[in-house]
Structure formats: C-alpha cells, structure tokens
Amino acid sequence: MTPAKFKPPFAESDRELRRRRFANEPSAWVVLFVLLESLLSFRGFSAETPSFRTDVMAVLSKAGCNAGGCHGNANGKAGFKLSLRGEDPDRDFNALTRDLYGRRTNPVEPDQSLILMKPAAVIAHEGGKRFSTESWEYRILRTWIESGMPKDRANLPVLESIVAVPAESILVEPQSEVQLRVSAAFSDGSRRDVSKIAVYEVANGGVSVTPQGLVSRETFGETTILVRYLNQQIPVRLAFIPARPDFQWSEPQVNNVVDEHIFAKLRQMRMNPSQLCTDDVFLRRAFLDLLGILPSAQEALEFVSDARSDKRERLIDELLKRSEFADFWALKWSDLLRNEERTLDQKGVENFHHWIRQSIQNGKPLDTFVRELISATGSTYGIPASNFYRANRDPIERSEAVAQVFLGTRLRCAQCHNHPFDRWTQDDYYSWAAVFSRIGYKILENRRQDSNDSHEFKGEQIVFVSRKGSVKNPRTGEPAVPRFLGAGNSRVEIDRAGLGELAAWITSGDNPFFARTQVNRIWFHFMGRGIVDPIDDFRATNPATHPGLIEALADDFVAHDFDLRWIIRTIMNSRTYQLSSVPNEENGDDETNYSRAWVRRLSAEQLFDGQSAVLGVAAKFQGYPTGMRAGQLPGARPEKVRGRRGAAESADQFLELFGKPQRLLTSECERSDETTMSQAFQMISGPTVNDLLTVPDNSLAKLIENGEPHRRIIEELYWSALTRAPTVPELERSEAYLGNSANLRQALEDIAWGLLNAKEFLLRR
C-alpha cells in the first residue's frame, strides 16, 4: 500500500493545550513531553506502515474489541469505548491516540501500549487473550504505533465491496470442510485478499469456522456464515448433505412456479419430498388456512366422496369466495396493525376492523389497501384507516412500523448506531423518522378509565398533518432531513400531499421491498415459515432460502395488480403446499426446504371456534352478539372485561392463554403458538372445554335425541372433530364404551373430550 505523508497524531492546537497543561508540572515531565513531541513530529515510516482504516480497524474487529459485548458496547468497557463494529473510524482513532492522554498507545515503547498488552494478556484483561505477541494482529498494531499512529490521507481508497468464494455451495459427504476466500474491492479499482483479516460468524449453527475461514461440518444441514470486513458484510450459504448413494429423484408432479423452485433445490439436496397428503388432510388444512375454521362433517364427507380430479382446485376457489375468508384475514391484519382497545377505544377498533374486513371482502388490491392506510387523515371514527396513525403515536413508532410491516425492514438497531447487520445508518433512521414528524392528533374527548395511564384513549381523535414538526438526529444534534428509506438523498416534503407521495412510493411496483415483503408474509401464513425468515427482516445477511422463488412470486404479484387471492391460489395449488407432513427417509430433519408440510398448533381462535363447532354451542363474548366467533372479534381482549370475573370472561382468558396477542407490536411474532403446561390444564380440566361439553342442548344431546345408532354417533363426532372416519379399532372401542355405559350422555362427553384433546384436533398438519 502506498504510504501517506506522515502527519503527527496531534494537531497544533492539541500540542499547545498539552504544553499549557504541563506548564506547572515538574521540569522532568516537561522535558519528557517535549522529547516525545519531537519524536512524533519527525518520525517517518516505511511503505509497510499499516493503514488505520483498512488494517488497524480490521484488527479491532477480528479480535472482537469493537463487538457489542466488549468495547463496542454503548457504554464501552473499563472506560474504553469504541464504535460498534467500527462504524466510526475517526472516533476510534481519537479513542486510541488521544483519550486518557494517549496512554493506550505508546510510540516510544510500542510494546508498553495498553492496546497491545491487554489483548495479548501481558497484563490482566477482562476480555481474556485475543491474540499472541507473535500474531499478525499484534504486528499490525505494533507497526502502526511504532510509526507514530498516523492518520490515513484524505484520498485513501475506500472499501466498496467484498466477495466470498464460494458464495454458496452444496457439499456432499465425504466432503466435510470448505475454505472461504474473501477479496475486497476498493474505490481505486484495486482488489485485496482479506481472507485472513475478515471476520467469520456462524449465523445458525451446524458448523464451526476458524478465524482463517475454514468451515467444518458438525451436523448435516444448511447453514449461513456471515463474512465481515470493515463496514461490508455478506452471507455465505452452505449445505452439508449425506452421500445417499442410492438416492433416486422421485419425479414429483410440478404444478406451477412454486414447485419448479422448491423441487429443483430438493433435487440438489438429494432429498425427495413427502407424498401428497390425503383428501381429508387437505380439506382440513385448506379450511384452517383460508377460513380459520373446521369443515363440518357434511362438507368433509362430500369432499372425500367427490371423484373429480380437479376437486382441490375447485375447493380453493369456493373457499376464497366465502365470508369467513374476509373474517380470518381481517384478524391477521388487525393483529399486524395494532387494532386494540386501549389506544383506539372500542368504537375505533370496530370501525377499523370493519374497514379492513370490507377491503378484503371486496377484493381491494393490497397496494390500494396500503396506500389508503399510509395517506389517511381525519376522524378516527369517520376515516377508519386513520386509526393506523392513532395506534402509532410518535414519529419513531410510525417509521419503525411502516418499515417493518410494509418494507420488511427492521430499523430499531439503527436508532443508537449504524445497523450492525444491515446497510442502514443512524442518519437513514432519523431521516426516515422525520418523514412522519408532522403527523399530529386533535383529541376531541378522552374518557379514559385510568387517569394514570397516558396511553389509554377513549374518544374521537382527528389525525392531521401539522405545519411544524421535526426529529432531531442525536449524532448531529440537528433536525434530520426527511428522506424516504433507501431512496437516495433527495429531501421530501412532509405536508398532506407528501403522505400521498409516500404511500405511492411504498406501494410502487418498482419498490424492491413492498411486493417481496407481502408475498413472504402470505407464504408464511400457509407454509409456516417465511422464504425470508423472520418474515419482516429482509437484509443481505438474512438471505432467502429460495431467492429465485420469492422474486418470481413478487413479480407475479405485481403483474396481477397485488391481488391477494391470486397469490394465495398460486401457493395452495402447488404440490408443495399439498405435501403430507409425514417425513420420508431423507427429509426427517428438513426445516427450511418445504419438503413436507409444517405441523403447527392451531391458533387460539381456531381452537376455541373448533371446540364450539364440534359441540354445536354458540360462542358468547361480552359486549358482542351471541354466535360471533373468536375469529370474528374486532379487537384484542376487550377493555370492558379487564379485571372482572365471571363466565363471560373465561373465553377471553382462553384466547389469551393460547397466544392471542395484545397487539402492542407491529409483528407476527407477538402471536404465540408455543405450548405450555397451563394450556394442558385448560384443555384437560379448564372451564371452557368442560362448559361446552355440559351444555344441555349441545350437539351431543341432539345426537342422543335423534336416536342415532352408536356407530353413527361415533362417526359423526370423528368427522366433526378430526375430519376423518374412525379407524376400525377406534370404532370398536368407542362402541364398546358406549354399550357398557349406564349413562350414555356422560359416555359421549368422555369420547368428545378425548377427541378435543387429541393431537389431530390440536394440530394443523
């Protein structure tokens, strides 16, 4: 590297300041200081002098010094603070050369520098030994210190990109290792091998990686290695797979573009997909995924007995037309848009939910739906879409919510520093937040019940765009310049028309974020995992499992005018969606390639509504008409039942226990499908299930009153609860149990209880 002209580490003003500071000290100190200044001023350095930005900063990263758990922490460690992952080289230069009177670096006796002695464990270091005195890291730092800690010249070539080889690879047994090679491209056109100095981090396990970039298999499967050098980072995707010498591709039928991409990768992975699921499993899956409810026994029997070859395609089309489709997808969007009573009040929640549901029922294109949300102002009662801004009450909340929900970008990490895993800087964060800085509220009335809760609102509000408002960038101390996220340096106006411009920019077919994010979210709801996962975290260091597929689906979505039903139909008609959840010899450990259906627990609303439907009992939620299903409720847990006791509240408690979100976050991750012991006790002996079983006029009573044979009663229960006929052993045991029971009603309650607690009932498979 061509050396820069030497400059002393301290500016002239700094020398004068130090001379004044030592003026009253003993003369020996003054002499020492003058001698040191002379040495610094006249010491030259050779062509081998390391660059601070490209070499020294790389060492600090390689050794982990500027990591979040060490000196890159917001508060530093032991009084020494570096910028996180080297995002601010100028500040780090000052911390090394000037902070604490420059005691961390000693150009007169380089080996006595704290920045060398501590990481080399010459003296005690809380972070332990990071490198040895014989290492290349030590040599780079020592040479730079010995050369007078020079700053880089202003026109030093800057890093533009890095490339890793291989960028992705499938390694078949006996291959168990791969050496990564990394090269860096600089602004002057030069390239440099940085394999030794780059940082390697395993993102999701299964392998180990040495500091030199040698990746070794620990278990079979796919993994991602994050490769970082200075401010650039890229993912490397690797798959270690068993040899499977007898593997033969099963040539599964390809229905559409989904299967083309999924099956192509499975073949590369030497992994056959599972068989097609049975008709009864498909029917149950389709009802749950599209409508959030179970098929009736009659619907199940009719579908299974239908001999038409295209009956699955016909079923999908029929279900997409049903009103329950709008109910179920309004529930999903209400979760995401924070439609909850504490902030919006009951009337606002109901109006917002009605607007969402009607938009879906009427087939409103998703880009139009989002444009109306983003540009909405006015009364939160009269213009329901304006409740989106009522729920997100300050510029920070709004900017993070819009970025995460509509652009698939998690920005929060950039609030305090440049994003450590993405390209967004702190300036990007506050410029984006500034776009939402003038949205204001006129509170016409607030009848809050808790005077100490400043986040509770009860009454109509007017959302409007103010003439004033700004967001301060803490890095500069100045108001941030409003700019669209990743859309260049052009300033945008934040008046009423500006909201329309923002809405149009977000939903444009040319916006690389919007279509991919929405397609990925829809895919997640049907397949159980996003092509990019987490589904709202698109970044280079979180690559898609099937990048070609998500691009193809996004392009198709745009080409068909952002039609929700179109993209759903495409996914559900694929053979991939219709695969069985039963693994074969090759895909038992697969969790990312969609080689079989993903088994998951029913949602809280699906469980509650399923129990009510099987037992023929109309649900009742306080404040809503009898018969309204859990999946039709507009809000989260109603404010009016908080803190009260009684039968009407047990249904709400059931939903909360089984993961219905409070809607405090703009993310699907708030809804939980985790299983707990409390849920087990609720299903076994809780009031919700047992109350439904003992209702005098439920479906069990009607089956008895109709005088149906025991066999017919048992079959009806199985088709209603499990969407299948009982097996011969199940039928024989159940008939014997009913025949030997002195109390037929109680015996039927026992059988129904067993079905409602069966895995087949609790799981979508």
Image (spheres, rainbow, N blue to C red):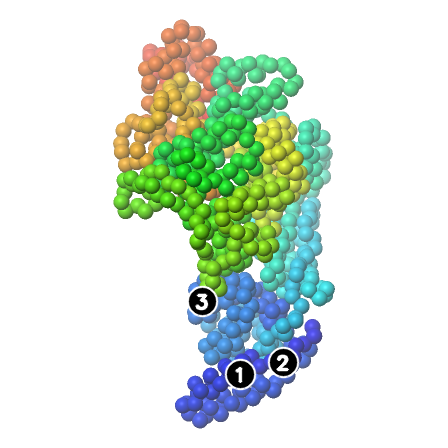
In this rendering, the answer to whether 740 lies above or below 534 is: above
Left or right of 262 on screen, residue 341: left
Q: Amino acid at mark 2?
A: Phe
Reading the image, the residue beneath label 3 is 77
Q: Residue at x 31, y 40 (%)?
A: 445
Q: Position of residue 588 (x, y in %)?
A: 59, 36
Question: Which numbered mark, 2 or 1, is in the foreground of this view?
Answer: 1
Quadrant into which the N terminus falls: bottom right
Task: Name the residue located 35 percent from the left edge and 26 percent from the top edge.
Answer: 624
- Inspect this view and state whether residue 284 appears: no
Residue at image position (62%, 52%) is: 235
Q: Which residue is mark 1?
A: 12
Mark 3 lies on a secondary structure that is loop
**Of residues 158 and 258, the one drawn nearer to the viewer in this rendering:** 158
Task: Tell me which label, 3 or 2, sits earlier in the chain.
Answer: 2
Mark 1 to mark 3 CA distance (whole Å): 30 Å
249 in relation to 503, above or below: above
As helix, strand or loop, the secondary structure at mark 1 comes to helix
**Rendered residue at 68%/30% (across/down):** 256
| Amino acid at dot 1 | Glu
Q: Which residue is denoted by mark 2 in the rendering?
A: 6
Q: Residues within 10 Å of mark 2 (few under 14, many from 20)?
A: some
Q: Residues within 10 Å of mark 3 (few under 14, many from 20)?
A: some
Residue nearer the viewer, 85 or 756: 85
Residue 696 visible in image: yes
Q: Quadrant of residue 738?
A: top left
Type of residue at label 3?
Lys
SS type, badge 2? loop
